[in-house]
Amino acid sequence: MLQVSDLVTFYATSQALFGMTFDVQAGEVVTLMGRNGMGKTTTINSIIGIVRPASGSVKFDGVEVSRLPSFKTANLGIGLVPEGRQVFPNLSVRENLIATASNHLKLPDPWTLDKVYAMFRELKARETSMGNLLSGGEQQMLAIGRALMTNPKLLVLDEATEGLAPLIREKIWTALSELRKSGLSILVVDKNLKDLLKLADRHFIIEKGQVVWTGTSAALKKNEDVQHRYLGV
Ligand code: ATP
């Protein structure tokens, strides 16, 4: 579904990605892991068109997307839950959810407000509250709900549990696990190895802008050397 090949990305003269290569198959949950500053967000932003790679390719369902504007990539079925949530502060919960709602791919049984509220009951209770008045956990649920309302085929989450209380984190992992069961493909950037080992099929570990290890959850669980060397566990 997603094939990222040999991505090279710079910020001015500073190189952040050095030939990033990985893939996500349909129905899979895949992670990008690595220490701070290794290039995970740059990879996601290069996929979604927020930064332009200097070379390499990003194919989504066979279409080259790395040089498309972000809205076109979103219309093709990539739903982004960005780092820092980025909810619209001056729109209500309901307005945040409907502002970008769409079903460009005409997927059957599309996401609706009621379905998002059923997944995150907290959002229903806060339906008329403005985005900037929500707690961090509520904002994170809203960011996920907003991405789902675009009816993506691939959901991409950048640090979706960062800075959240354990109980809220648990809710997010449960929601992702339900989404996985529904067949949605998911690409996750996160630091919670334990939770990711339970949720994901495969992992790509990143060091200095390239993949240095890849394998299944079972393989990563066993490989304490890789956990220690690249994740500081
Ligand atoms: P984190 O977990 O801290 O978010 P990351 O793995 O997502 O880290 P990136 O944010 O992609 O890493 O950063 C990769 C490299 O690019 C780092 O050296 C970082 O300092 C640099 N970088 C990131 N954003 C910019 C920017 N806007 N301008 C210049 N350099 C940047």
Image (tube, rainbow, N blue to C red):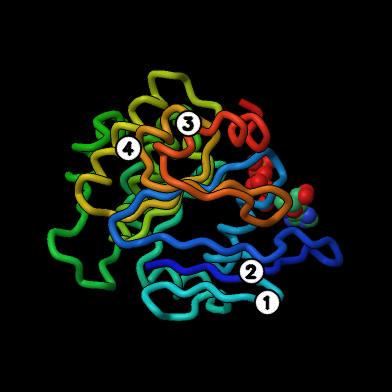
Residue furthest out toward the right: 13
**Which residue type carries mark 2?**
Leu
Please state the horizontal and vertical placement of residue 110, each as a whole percent of the image. Answer: 18, 59
Q: The disc labelled 3 sits on which kind of residue? A: Lys
Of 90 and 173, nearer the camera is 173
Under circle 4, the secondary element is loop
Residue 7 got which mark?
A: 2
Q: Alpha-carbon neighbours of circle 3 within 10 Å: few (<14), some, or many (≥20)? A: few
Residue 34 coordinates in the image, percent (x, y): 62, 41
Nearer to us of marks 4 and 3 is 3
Residue at label 4? 128
Residue wearing tag 1 = 55
Tell me the quadrant of the picture where the N terminus can be found: bottom left
Please tell me which of labels 3 and 2 falls first in the chain: 2
Residue 162 higher or lower than 44, as above or below: above
The residue under the point 23% across, 40% down is 178
Contact flag, marks 4 and 3 (Cβ < 8 Å): no
In the image, taking residue 128 as reference, residue 136 lies left or right, namely right
Q: Are marks 2 and 1 in contact (CB under 8 Å)?
A: yes
Q: In this rendering, which labeled residue sits more in front, label 4 or label 1?
A: 1
Instruction: Indicate which disc, 4 or 3, sits on the residue closer to the N terminus.
Output: 4
- 53 vs 117, nearest the viewer: 53
